[in-house]
Image (spheres, helix red, strand yellow):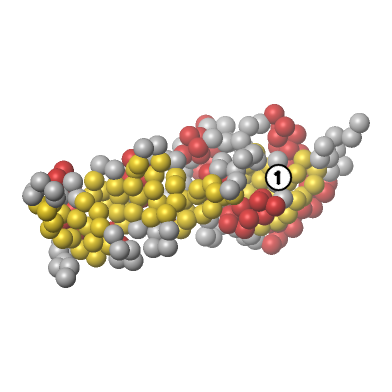
């Protein structure tokens, strides 16, 4: 009985690296049924390809422009059936110690055929990486947040986010164009993107660049409070008493006619 071939997606921004992996996979195919479902030059392209060509394994470089391999791996977890991820990298041995500690599989460039074959043979026994293990690896802040809509992963560029607001079990992501729902912790988002966002309320982070100013307003009880006036959207957000230092820190009061 024929074995089901292992479906593989190659992700690397360098053409020679993708070509070499293709050649090595051809060599491995003599001993292990496999099929390359596609190639991508960066993370966003990989996610688009996987929407129409599912894979069991993603072989991805770590250092890539726009979205690196570690961020790609985090977004892959939003898929209904996340693939196994094996990283390829030119990192030196010391930098890879964290990968060993957290049992994350990787291939050191230049990749050798026997090492690749050994990694491929382990794939059926492996589970997709979880977010907790990925968060322990040395990485930069994400450039995108990812949400699932109609079984598809949608990427939201961080630079487009006006605010993040916790509501029940979800985070509302607000951009100038629309809202998205995200299942993540507001505190963890603040830790990851603290340089870009400022907390104005226990349930709300606002992008510093989106703050046009602050306005003093009265609530229904006649008490005065500050509200954030935002660029790009016709909406203001209350500043809690505990967070009123942001008004002094950012210091832009506006008058709204």
Task: Give the residue at x 60% y 43%.
Answer: 79
**Closer to the camera in the image, 213 or 23:** 213
- Residue 31, quarter of the rendered image: top right
Is residue 44 among the parts visible in the rendering?
yes
Q: Residue extending furthest front?
A: 220
Q: Which residue is mark 1?
A: 55
- Residue 42, quarter of the rendered image: bottom right
Q: Is residue 222 left or right of residue 113?
A: left
**Closer to the camera in the image, 3 or 182:** 182
Residue 153 image offset from top left, x and y in percent:
56, 49
Is residue 100 among the parts visible in the rendering?
no
**Closer to the camera in the image, 66 or 18:** 66
Q: Mark 1: few, some, or many residues within 10 Å (few <14, many ≥20)? A: many
Residue 236 image offset from top left, x and y in percent:
25, 58
Indicate whether 243 appears above or below 162: above
Quadrant of the snapshot with the N terminus: top right
Task: Give the residue at x 42% y 54%.
Answer: 179
In terms of secondary structure, where does tag 1 sit? loop
Indicate whether 206 appears above or below 101: below
Task: Give the residue at x 62% y 58%.
Answer: 45
Q: Is residue 114 left or right of residue 222?
A: right
Residue 256 image offset from top left, x and y in percent:
17, 68
Residue 78 image offset from top left, x and y in percent:
55, 43
Q: Residue extending furthest top?
A: 125
Task: Give the residue at x 16% y 60%.
Answer: 215
Q: Is residue 201 left or right of residue 70?
A: left
- Residue 129, quarter of the rendered image: top right
């Amino acid at each position: 009985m024929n074995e089901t071939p292992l479906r593989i997606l190659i992700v690397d921004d360098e053409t020679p690296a993708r070509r070499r992996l293709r050649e090595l996979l051809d060599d491995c195919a003599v001993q292990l049924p496999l099929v390359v479902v596609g190639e991508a030059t960066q993370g966003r392209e990989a996610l688009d390809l996987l929407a129409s060509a599912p894979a069991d394994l993603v072989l991805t470089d770590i250092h890539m422009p726009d979205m690196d391999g570690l961020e790609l791996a985090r977004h892959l977890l939003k898929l209904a059936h996340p693939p196994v991820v094996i990283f390829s990298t030119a990192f030196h041995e010391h930098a890879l110690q964290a990968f060993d500690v957290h049992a994350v599989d990787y291939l050191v460039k230049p990749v050798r055929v026997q090492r690749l074959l050994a990694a491929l043979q382990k794939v059926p026994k492996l589970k997709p990486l979880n977010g907790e293990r990925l968060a322990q690896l040395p990485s930069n802040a994400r450039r995108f947040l990812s949400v699932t809509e109609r079984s598809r992963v949608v990427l939201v560029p961080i630079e487009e986010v006006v605010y993040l607001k916790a509501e029940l079990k979800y985070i509302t992501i607000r951009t100038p164009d629309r809202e998205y729902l995200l299942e993540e912790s507001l505190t963890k988002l603040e830790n990851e993107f603290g340089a870009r966002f400022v907390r104005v309320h226990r349930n709300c982070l606002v992008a510093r660049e989106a703050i046009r100013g602050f306005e003093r307003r009265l609530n229904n009880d006649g008490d005065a409070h500050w509200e954030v006036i935002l660029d790009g959207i016709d909406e203001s957000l209350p500043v809690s008493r505990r967070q009123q230092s942001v008004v002094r820190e950012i210091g832009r009061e506006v008058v709204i006619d």
